[in-house]
Amino acid sequence: MTKFTQKTSLWTPIKKLFILYLGLIGLFFLGRLGLFFLYFERIIQSHTEYWWSFVYGLRMDTIVASLFLLIPAILLLLLPSRLKRLGNISLRFYFLLIFLVAIYIENATFPFFAEFDVRPNALFINYLEYPKEVFGNIWASYKLEIFISTVMLLTFAVWFWKRSQYFFIEVYNIPYTQRILLFLPVFIVLFIGVRSSFGHRPANISDATYTHSHLVNEITKNSLYAIGYAYYSQKTTGFEMKRYGKMPLAEAYQRMGKRLELNPKACKTPFARIVSTAFKRDKLKNLVIFVQESLGAQFVGALGDKRGLTPNLDRYAQEGLWFTSLYSNGTRSIRGLAALTAGFLPVAGKGVLKRNKSQKDFFTVAQLLKPYGYHSVFIYGGEKRFDNMASWYYGNGFDEIIDENKFNNPTFHGIWGVSDEDLVKRANEEFKHFYEKQQPFVSVMFSTSNHTPFEFPEGRIELVKGVKKHSVENAIKYADYSIGLFIDSARKEAYYKDTVFLIASDHNVRVYGDDLLPFNLFKIMGIILGEGVEAKTINRLTMQPDLLATALDLIGIDKLRYPILGHSIYESHHKNMSLMKFHQMYGLRVKDEIAIIQPEEQPVTMKIRNGHLVESSHNIELEKDTLGFIIGINALYQNKAFRPVMQEDCR
């Protein structure tokens, strides 16, 4: 990038743009190469043609680079020479910003990939809404990465600004008419680069999905493209739905109903019904739903782990309803909260906690039990504004929210809020108070401690040997300690005998793997406890809404009316399925067969063999049923049809 001369070739602007294209492509290539070597052991086990990742990846990178070069092409070729100094300084600032953003995103990709096993996507965007929690977590967990990234950014900024002093200005020595004539062919080339296809549709992120390996497909993508694509998809939900496929709503509901064993037309509200209880009581029981942050099945002794991380859960597994094949419906807390609080399944795009049409008159357990005199309270160790929880819970029937600002002198306060033991101690005091007033109550509790950077108070647990203190293993052990503290304390109180306790995970700590859909890591912990609750192991395939329906069965209200998309285990049904949403991908599992649908991709059917997915012949009906769930769930939200069931709705 040296000082210009007066003699300038007509090829100069093309050479300049090509150099910048190579710079961007080289940066993206280095990022992909870093991921490739970092995860090479997993990649070679995928048994795919993984080297094609660089070819398909070049296509993704070219789309981004060509898009970034459109504005410079306009300024270089259409700006009059008298404005050359303005053009030069504008382009220097423009490319400085572009390269700094690209370097930052490529650096951020590595810790994000380590956490979520995907390139930055909608999660990356959504977390930016909570700078306090997110940047606190980043600072606590990634100090070295922050230092390296900062050095890279500063070094590049100084180098680029010095070297680019005359890089663009010499282009303006070319006569204006010649530059105008050059603009059209340059624009056509860049347009082809952005479109990256001569077919009916331009290339998009689905073109990076060329193998059955989720890992290889993610490495093939471009992080900036993935972020932009996620942002666009969130702003255009209707467009996003079209990318999955089309189906008449009546057929979608019919297919959902067949798999759920629910009649979508039994009441005016779709999937609503009148449910008889197997435990009709004169004195109704209270209900406590304790949602555990990221407590995956792989950590639980009673589900096969040998490290002794969950002695309390292992003990309780012998004392209540213990679910050994429970699968979460998503990978975000808001999906788990909607499933365990409302019995809803994952809608495409943002979860219902954060969407406009579900902030009022959306069915929840609080609205269901309010006519029976129940006081409802959501107790959370963090800030209630996080993930829009305050608006959603208050707007849908909850009487009270207790969040971190209402904890006086907590034992421990971390980045995500007060510790789990502070949460359970406060909950225990609240429940004692309600019971003393003879006030029936329903409560949703949500833990925080088992979340990066895995902070917890000293002296509560014996640290796991061989791992660092602030590790997921120790955080799991502390979460189990707090569960034990809660249940054992409750058993000493009068309210225990009149309360049903549902304890379940919102999702797993990290859902990653080499399968196209890493179904194994959707497996989570779930148990229902209480005086009079039988000790029984439930081995059949279950989802989070099934737990809510079962807990409601146990509190003893007969003829409840609700639209929960799940069944009590005491109901007579043969449903053996699970619906899983993994980023933009949906998987419908029935027994050991899974149909998978991704946007703008042909559906595939895979079978579970030795703990992994293997390709199978198409199960057309199962694939159509999966699409039915995607369309039907979206319609329940869009049409505000997942709502409290009025008496006149069901006869």
Image (spheres, rainbow, N blue to C red):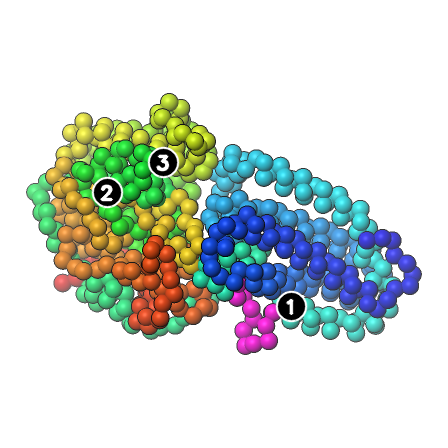
Earlier sequence position, callout 2 versus callout 3: 3
Name the residue located 39 percent from the left edge and 67 percent from the top edge: 604
Which residue lies under the disc numbered 1? Answer: 193
Q: Amino acid at mark 1?
A: Gly
Q: Amino acid at mark 3?
A: Ile
Residue 514: give x, y in percent of width and height.
44, 54
Q: Which mark is residue 476?
A: 3
Earlier sequence position, callout 1 versus callout 3: 1
Relative to the observer, which residue lies in front, 308 or 364? 308
Which residue lies under the disc numbered 2? Answer: 527
Horizontal relation, residue 596 to residue 572: left or right: right
Query: What secondary structure is found at the residue carrying circle 1?
Result: helix
Q: Residues within 10 Å of mark 1 (few under 14, many from 20)?
A: many
Q: What residue span does the magenta drawing correspond to?
A: 196-209
Closest to the camera, between mark 1 and mark 3, is 3
Q: Tell me which corner region of the image, top left, top right, bottom left or bottom right, holds residue 580.
A: bottom left
Query: What secondary structure is found at the residue carrying circle 2?
Result: strand
Dominant secondary structure of the magenta stretch? loop
- In the rendered view of the protein, which quadrant contains the C terminus? bottom left
